[in-house]
Amino acid sequence: MFKLNIFNFARFLSLIFLLNFVCLPVKSSSALAAWSLKSNGVLELRTRKNSKLKAYYQKANQLYGDRFWIDFNGELQNPRIIKGNGPVKEIRLGKPFNGMTRLVIEFGPQKSINPYQLKLIAVDENKWKIKLTTFPINSFKTIKEGSVSKAPPSSMKRREYGSLRDIKSRIEDLPNIRRNKYSVVIDPGHGGYDSGAVGIDGLKEADVVLEVSRIVTKLLLEKGVNVKMTRNKEIDLDLSPRVALANKLNSDIFVSIHANASRGKKRYINGIETFYYSGWRGKLLAEKIQKEILKVSPGSPDRGVRRGRYFVIKKTNMPAVLTEIGFITGRLDARRLEKKIHRRRVAFAIAKGILEYLKRIG
Ligand SMILES: [Zn+2]
């Protein structure tokens, strides 16, 4: 039935924004909770958190009109076809493979969509949006199932976000290392006059990273690591004293914590990235930290671990990394970074990455 034209398939697959999430067990029920195709041509989705979505497009052929579909984890209970109206022929919910759910929107012969403009945006941890097309005014009546705006039940919310107490109680979940053996310098980026990047609703990089750094420090201290922060206040601190502190202490590692901003403050740009300057140790540390931050930032793209020539990681004598914990100019990341609880989760992730690294290096 889905005899895909391989050329189109591969071509459009790479064009469409693919968001890779933590996979759910195959046996679980459908991750798609609600959907709505609005009269303005926007498809909105509500899914389970940590869902994995893949979007596809195929141009019309003799059998079908233009089709756009999204695959979700989890098996659909009752496959169904919903009759469309106006330029939309029909909407199908199916189960292409065991353990999957597929939402297909098929357009009528008079409507073609431009795949180059399709962009699936994660609006929140469980909400998605994609502008499929522009319908002529009054030509299409919204079709939906369920409520795309419904908030997750509060019990679920609590479990997802956790409280500070939860995080403290989870200190036991962090890897154990030899106490009093290691020393770490944590460097909260910017500070004072230098607020760093300024994001949505005036969110300041310097404030966000200071709070995260303080929690990382607390967690590491609890685990018996000797930790020094380059700044523990909102002060303006040049780059060289940061490096000098780490070199003087001869710490085992140096971790600089930053938040990103995109040029032109593009709200659709989100993601996590971690830089190291050289050596396998620096790379390993960057990888451990990157992996853990991604785990607590579902939907935020993995921009990878890369070499970077930033002053603080270049001039320090020990394995050193600079991590960007999200875009304060990005809709998805900023919404999280403004929340204390997310800052705690990121701090927990960074501490975990550091401890795993120390444990491995021994
Ligand atoms: Zn920065």
Image: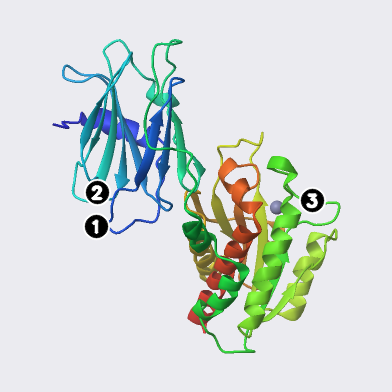
Measured in 3D between alpha carbons, the distance from the residue under mark 2 to the one under mark 1, in whole angstroms, is 7 Å
On whether ligand 1 comes within 8 Å of the CB at mark 1, the answer is no
Front residue of 42/138: it is 138
Q: Position of residue 326 (x, y in %)?
A: 59, 51
Specify few, some or many for label 3: CA neighbours under 10 Å numbering under 14, 14-19, or 20 or more.
some
Q: Nearer the viewer, mark 3 or mark 2?
A: 2
Report the mark closest to the observer, 1 or 3: 1
The amino acid on which the numbered mark 3 sits, given as a three-letter code, is Ser
Task: Say which quarter of the image contains residue 216.
Answer: bottom right
Q: CA distance from mark 1 to mark 3?
A: 47 Å
- Among all residues in the image, which is located at the extreme left? 1
In the structure shown, which secondary structural element does the residue marked by tag 3 occupy? loop
Query: Contact, CB < 8 Å: mark 2 with mark 1?
Result: yes
Q: Which of the numbered marks, if any, corresponds to residue 75?
A: 2
Describe residue 155's horizontal placement relative to residue 227 as left or right. left
Residue drawn at (43%, 10%) of the image? 136
Mark 1 neighbour class, 10 Å CA radius: few under 14, some 14 to 19, many 20 or more: few
Mark 2 or mark 1, earlier in chain: 1
Identity, as a three-letter code, of the amino acid under mark 1: Lys
Q: Looking at the picture, how far across and down is residue 132, in whole percent?
A: 41, 25
Ligand 1 within 8 Å of the CB at mark 3: no
Disc number for residue 174: none
Q: Is residue 316 visible?
A: no
Residue at left 66%, top 81%?
A: 221
Residue at the disc numbered 1: 27
Which amino acid is tagged 2? Answer: Glu
> Where residue 333 appears, x then y in whole percent?
58, 48
